[in-house]
Amino acid sequence: MTAVVKELNVFGKALRKLKGFAKSGVIAELDLENLRLIEEYEADLLAEGVRLSNWLIREGGPSLFGVVHERLVAMYVCAGRGIEAERHLWQMKLVGKEVSGDLHDIVLAICASQKEPELGPISRLLTRMEASSSLQKKKTLSWLLRGYIKGGHFENAAETVIKMLDLGLYPEFLDRAAVLQGLRRRIQQSGSLEIYLNLCKNLSDASLIGPCLVYLYVNKYRLWIIRML
């Protein structure tokens, strides 16, 4: 199983590098056939890992259950599959295997980065934060925030930034900038200003940004609207 995890990790890094080359125009975009082959190879690796885990649980006995689920979490983390990783995280706890805070936060970020993030797993993973120190809360919410940013879920990211500010926690500058930039792009596409304005107000109240001038042009009335936050 360790070999499967390593292979998934190497495969994931190579795939991210390949997509980066395609995005920068160094190579052509991956066609449907190549994408199909990539998905099949990853699915085969995951299936092999599951087969090995079933064999270990059947032949190895309860003493190996925690290690097996830990490897399954690592395997699904490498594959970017948050729901499956979260399920085996709880299985680790059920069999008495200690789960590190770092692993918990990584799974949380992956769940947040999914194409359609589900609130159930994210809410369950956030429950441990209630009894955490301020430093740990900031770390956990920063992982959540970066997961949303990676997945392009900027509305959720904005809500996370505001939640951090309400708790007296200041998100990192690059994270704040990424959320604002992402929301600005959404405004150009959808014209929705409310979330962006609310985030700017909260950041300004926390003295993390200066006063903002927001310009909006209404084509129908040939009207400029200027608002200071």
Image (spheres, rainbow, N blue to C red):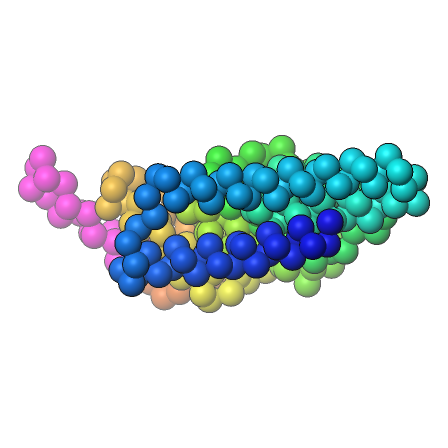
**For residue 73, side relative to residue 34 (left or right):** right
* Mark count: 0
Task: Let me know if residue 82 appears in the view.
Answer: no
Q: Is residue 130 left or right of residue 9?
A: right
Whether 38 is among the magenta residues is no
Residue 135, x across and y down, in percent? 68, 63
Query: Is residue 174 something that shows in the picture?
Result: yes
Image point 27% across, 38% down: which residue? 190
| Pick the front one: 216 or 48 | 48
Q: Residue at x 30, y 50 (%)?
A: 29
Residue nearest the viewer, comparing 20 with 218: 20
Residue drawn at 70 percent across, 58 percent down: 102
- Secondary structure mostly seen in the magenta stretch: strand
> Is 217 positioned to the left or the right of 108 in the image?
left
Span colored in magenta: 212-229
Foreground: 191 or 200?
A: 191
Looking at the picture, how far across and down is residue 203, in whole percent? Answer: 44, 58
Question: Is residue 215 toward the left or the right of residue 80 in the image?
Answer: left
For residue 218: magenta? yes
